[in-house]
Image (tube, grey):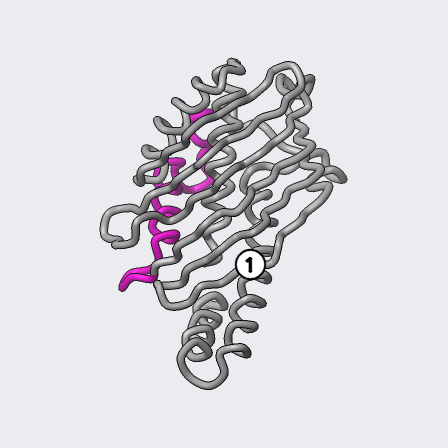
């Protein structure tokens, strides 16, 4: 579970990296890039209904994003997001530090499937690491690898998580502000670490609440096991 927001973030980064690398504001080009680079990187189907990005004011929106599962998993998908909105500072696009005034992921639906050798998100994360290379090697796209980001506002709201088709959770909204502002920007890896820590806290809180409401047995037992899984115990 602690990997899943990192995957969500990677999908967002693919979109931004495509914008920087292709240097083309047309949404259809970014859509093509997501659906081409995403499956290669994650070894899972990636689809997005539409992408709109303005080069003049930096406003962008991804609609109906869907991340499938790698081979070996049974659920229909790992993640679906109704909308991902972002506002980029246009003048920063050519700089080493990109300024994003806003990133909003609205109403994502997450299915966390636990298998014998790990979860669907563990598998996706492994595929991403294999794609990017190990031992501190740079990703294949050196241009996007060298970029840092400052994010004024990063919000995930109205998220729903299904845990092994047994527990359905509503996550508290996640709001982070001024990410990277004090240190001259953060890399995508640093950003992922920051957000995953926040997500873990929200997930444990939601699972604990589910256990209390569920009482003894049933939901409570499942939530307790899920909490242990999140904590790695």
Toward the right, the furthest residue is 182
Give how far across and how far down residue 34 sits, in percent. 41, 28
Quadrant for the C terminus in the image: bottom left
Element at label 1: loop
Q: Is residue 161 above or below residue 222?
A: above
- Residue 73 is left or right of residue 63, and the answer is left
Question: On the rendered image, what quadrant is the N terminus found in?
Answer: bottom left
| Figure check: 16 above or below 21 | below
Name which residue lies at 60% across and 58% down. Answer: 172
Q: Which residue lies most toward the left here? A: 72
Q: Position of residue 108 (x, y in %)?
A: 49, 47
Question: Which residue is rendered at x = 62% and y = 17% of the image?
Answer: 94
- Number of marks in the rendered image: 1
Pick whichever, 205 or 17, lies toward us: 205
Mark 1, Cα crowd under 10 Å, few <14 / some 14-19 / many 20+, is some
Instruction: Indicate yes or no whether the magenta region holds residue 119.
Output: yes
Residue identified by numbered label 1: 171
Is residue 86 covered in magenta? no
Residue located 60% across and 39% down the image: 104
Location of residue 39 in the rendering, given as x and y in whole percent from the top left corner: 33, 34
Taking the spot 51% from the left edge, 41% from the top edge, the residue there is: 9
Q: Relative to 63, does residue 220 appear above or below in the rendering?
A: below
- Left/right placement of residue 192 relative to residue 73 reads right
Q: Identify which residue, 149 or 102, lies in the foreground.
A: 102
Whether 139 is drawn above or below 121: the answer is above
Within the image, what quadrant is residue 173 found in? bottom right
- Residues shaded magenta: 114-141
Q: Position of residue 23 (x, y in %)?
A: 52, 14
């Amino acid at each position: 579970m602690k990997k899943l927001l990192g995957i969500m973030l990677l999908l967002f980064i693919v979109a931004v990296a495509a914008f920087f690398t292709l240097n083309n504001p047309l949404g259809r080009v970014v859509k093509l890039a997501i659906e081409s680079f995403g499956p290669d990187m994650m070894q899972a189907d990636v689809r997005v209904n539409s992408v709109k990005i303005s080069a003049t004011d930096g406003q962008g929106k991804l609609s109906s994003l869907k991340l499938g599962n790698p081979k070996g998993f049974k659920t229909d998908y790992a993640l679906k997001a109704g909308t991902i909105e972002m506002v980029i500072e246009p003048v920063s696009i050519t700089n080493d530090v990109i300024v994003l005034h806003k990133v909003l992921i609205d109403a994502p639906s997450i299915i966390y499937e636990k298998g014998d050798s790990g979860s669907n998100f563990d598998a996706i994360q492994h595929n991403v690491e294999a794609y990017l290379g190990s031992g501190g090697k740079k990703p294949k796209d050196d241009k996007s690898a060298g970029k840092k980001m400052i994010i004024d506002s990063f919000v995930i709201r109205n998220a729903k998580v299904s845990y092994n088709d047994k527990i359905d959770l509503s996550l508290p909204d996640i709001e982070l502000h001024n990410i990277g502002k004090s240190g001259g920007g953060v890399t995508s890896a640093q950003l992922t670490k920051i957000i995953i820590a926040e997500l873990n806290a929200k997930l444990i809180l939601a699972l604990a609440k589910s256990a209390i409401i569920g009482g003894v047995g049933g939901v409570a037992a499942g939530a307790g096991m899920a909490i242990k899984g999140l904590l790695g115990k």
